[in-house]
Amino acid sequence: MPAGRLRQVRRPLRAPRPLALLAALLVPALAGAAPAAPPPPATPPARVVSMNLCTDQLAMLLAAPGQLVSVSHLARDPQMSAMVAEAAAYPPNRGRAEEVYLMRPDLVLAGTYDGPPVAMLARLGVPVVTLAPPTSLAETRAAIRTIGQALGRAPAAEAMLAQFDARLARLAHPAGDGAPLAATWGPNGYSAGAESLAGDVLKTAGFALLSERLGMAGSGTVPLETLVLADPALIVTGRRFPGASRAEETLTHPALTHLHARRIEIPDADWACGIPQVLDALATLAEAREALPATAGQP
């Protein structure tokens, strides 16, 4: 789903109800399907709460001063968020329907995986925009426009898109025949597929994907033996999480030392969400590609 969905009900937002009543409403809320999305409201929302990492960051970038009143606690996580410093200015929430409702929002921004809380909020009469995780740079553009429209900040979104497109045009080097082979390599051999945001960024930087060669559309795992035999020109890893993890032992396996691949690190925060900062990952990859020998990674 490339864009968000606005879900509204006709009755006005009421004063907060006791938590016991909210809990009583939870079961019927989960059972009902959301109505079709109407056009964005003519009056911009004044109290916006975001409960999803990706909508957090788009809202912080696009909201008018004082319009955004809370973001999810994940926005303060340096492993996942590209806007930790900015998030410190907003009270955090944990995406619980009761918690969000008591903030009296006139718009909630959420992800498509936040189903139960979103259903309950809709049942309580709170307008909700849901945004699917973008799987491409094109869907990233659509997400920026969707949140801009929902906030009543379409001109700001269009200005952001103009800057995004200009930088993208400077960095893009679409992969052609003989493109160097690249693979993302995470804990337990996790690798981004062709139909993922990371995969699209890699292809836009001019790389062929090992995962695509293996027939992986979405993300999944690649056996270490397969990675070694493919001998890609570039291996992209993320930053390791604090503390020891057996899943991360694959990142330092001795077999990797026998590969000719250049290894670079891109923080998960750079391409976990469809936000303008995803072009920072593209810039890192474009620089890595320029540094490779002309025949690197070619079949």
Image: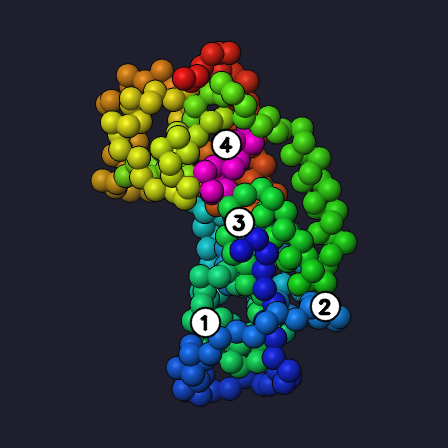
Q: In this view, does 147 lie to the left or right of 241?
A: right
Residue at position x 52%, y 27% in the image: 285
**Placement of 42 over or under 172, stated as above or below:** below
In this figure, which residue is indicated by the disc labeled 1?
A: 117
C-alpha distance separating marks 4 and 3: 15 Å
Name which residue type carries label 4: Leu
Residue in the foreground of this view, choosing between 56 and 155: 155
Give the extent of the magenta segment.
Answer: 194-205
Badge number at residue 251: none
Instruction: Classify mark 1: helix, strand or loop.
Output: helix
Element type at mark 3 = loop
Which residue is denoted by mark 3 in the rendering? 134
Disc on the earlier residue, 2 or 4: 2
* 139 horizontally vs 30: left or right: right
Report the residue marked by disc 2: 44
The residue closer to the viewer here, 192 or 237, is 192
